[in-house]
Image: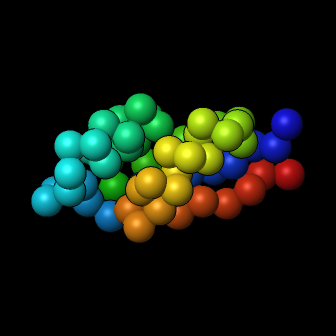
Amino acid sequence: MAKIKVTKVKSAINRTQRQKRTLESLGLKKIGQVVEHEATSSILGMVSKVNHLVSVEEIK
């Protein structure tokens, strides 16, 4: 399965509680923090909900 690298690029201040919890469940706390995940449908769904706060790149 493919892997993706997710980087937090914007702050979660003034965001909804749902978006803040989504970032936490992805493992992102600080701006600039990078995490790697398997590209499952649940992870991709979470990333799409906060795509304005993160950047995503595929790892081959």
Report the number of numbered marks. 0
Q: Does residue 36 appear in the picture of this structure?
A: no
Quadrant containing the N terminus in the rendered view: top right
Instruction: List x then y, in percent, for residue 27.
Output: 44, 35
Instruction: List x then y, in percent, for residue 48.
Output: 52, 56
Horizontally, residue 54 falls left or right of residue 41, namely: left
Classify residue 37 by image quadrant. Answer: top right
Q: Residue furthest left?
A: 14
Residue for point 52% across, 51% down: 47
Rendering colour mode: rainbow
Instruction: List x then y, in percent, for residue 57.
Output: 67, 60
Q: Is residue 3 above or below residue 58?
A: above
Residue for point 34% across, 55% down: 31
Q: 30 and 49: which one is in front?
A: 49
Q: 3 and 48: which one is in front?
A: 48
Classify residue 15 by image quadrant. Answer: bottom left
Instruction: List x then y, in percent, for residue 42.
Output: 60, 36
Residue for point 70% across, 37% down: 40
